[in-house]
Image (cartoon, coloured by chain):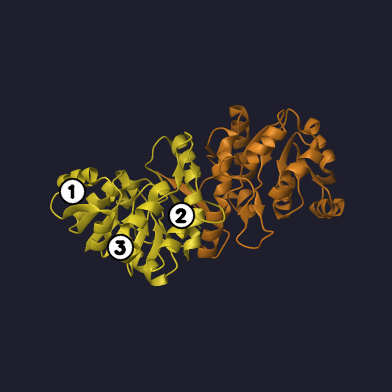
Chain colours: A yellow, B orange
Amino acid sequence: MRIAILGTGLVGKTIGDKLVSIGHEVRMGSRDSDKAAAWSKEAGRGASHGTFAEAAAFGEVAFNCTAGTGSLAALDAAGRENLANKILLDVSNPLDFSKGRPPTLTILNTDSLGEAIQRQLPDTRVVKTLNTMNCRIMVDAARVPGEHDVFVAGNDPDARAQVSRWLKEWFGWKAPVDLGDITASRGLEMWLPLWLRIMSSVKTPDFNVKIVR
Amino acid sequence: MRIAILGTGLVGKTIGDKLVSIGHEVRMGSRDSDKAAAWSKEAGRGASHGTFAEAAAFGEVAFNCTAGTGSLAALDAAGRENLANKILLDVSNPLDFSKGRPPTLTILNTDSLGEAIQRQLPDTRVVKTLNTMNCRIMVDAARVPGEHDVFVAGNDPDARAQVSRWLKEWFGWKAPVDLGDITASRGLEMWLPLWLRIMSSVKTPDFNVKIVR
């Protein structure tokens, strides 16, 4: 498949590397073309780079891997028309580190970044997923041994089902938990403060949660 | 032990019943003495009731089981002096249902109810715990089969350790996860919106999370 990665941070590079490694054509979009160019050179065959708009136009599907505080601007640059009728996997978290640690959330409680992105891109099927864990686990569920969970949330049931199949096929997630419409992004993003505290307690980002019944 | 339960809702009654059943003297405190009286009559030997202040004065340790939006007022009524030099297990969540469902949080992100309670009761060692799950699981870890986790957070390490021992002895929690100081209440309380969505997805409140490494 042709896949757009928006964002040049560790999350974007990790997802891009994985998708290239399993044979997809991946175009990384960025504001700073140097970073995306460096990635595509290193990632090799199948990898390319461009502006946010060029990557979005190229992809049959796109990942939002930009920093949450810059996501709406990046997606504006990507262009509503370039993402129309496509699925956008939104992996971002609206974390604000500008006042130090711990970060705070810039949008929460009665709204979420996932919802704000869906409002800004009404022709795109936004699916919030993977934002609840470290990026090395996102692309390799088996990195954490045993059973543990990933979530999907978005307004379109078919898009949630399609993303669930991709998560299985690409990254090894056996049974993503369907949380329904995009308003579940509130809870998925508000999980981050607890994730950060648990990381401090267990002293590694290599953990995930399992819903036990 | 002599234990105070502040609050007459399902959480307070469930914790009170369990503690009475294992031989403790439990006094339920309330604003509405009828409800607490009805509970103590039903709970039988070891159970008693009184005002918030009477219960707080009676307990060697106290549970805050009041609704989060009323916790600060209830604890003010309980009296700083009656809770001084004691551990308060804070089980509450600052959920506001006044505008319907889903509820929102009244305090979050840069603060939490656990922190607000600790500020209001500087002579008390507040330990946030158990608020991340349904009350039937709080008092009976084995209700959910297999391994899953409970958290403790509070400014005093000895109080966290003591609460961890009580959680094991009273409710069967083998290894509570220590999240450090009371600011972890932010994450523990902001977990609730995700908990509610997961409950809708799995269609039962009988679930809990396990941190998998």
Asked which secondary structure carries label 2, the reply is helix
Are the residues flagged by discs 3 and 1 in contact, CB closer than 8 Å? Answer: no
Tell me which amino acid carries mark 2: Leu
Q: Which residue position holds label 3?
A: A166
* Chain of the residue under label 3: A
Q: How far apart are marks 3 and 2 (CA)?
A: 22 Å
Asked which secondary structure carries label 1, the reply is helix
B137 left or right of A15 in image: right
Question: Which one is closest to the eye, mark 3 or mark 2?
Answer: 2
Tell me which amino acid carries mark 3: Trp
Vertical order, B197 against B211 (above or below) = below
Labels 2 and 1 in the same subunit: yes
Tell me which amino acid carries mark 1: Ser
B132 left or right of B38 in image: left
Q: Which residue position holds label 2?
A: A113
Q: Using a 10 Å C-alpha cutoff, classify the residue at mark 2 as few (fewer than 14 neighbours), some (14 to 19) or many (20 or more).
A: many
Q: Is residue B159 visible?
A: yes
Vertical order, B111 against A93 (above or below) = above
Q: Using a 10 Å C-alpha cutoff, classify the residue at mark 1 as few (fewer than 14 neighbours), some (14 to 19) or many (20 or more).
A: many
Q: In which quarter of the image is residue B108?
A: top right
Q: Which residue position holds label 1?
A: A40
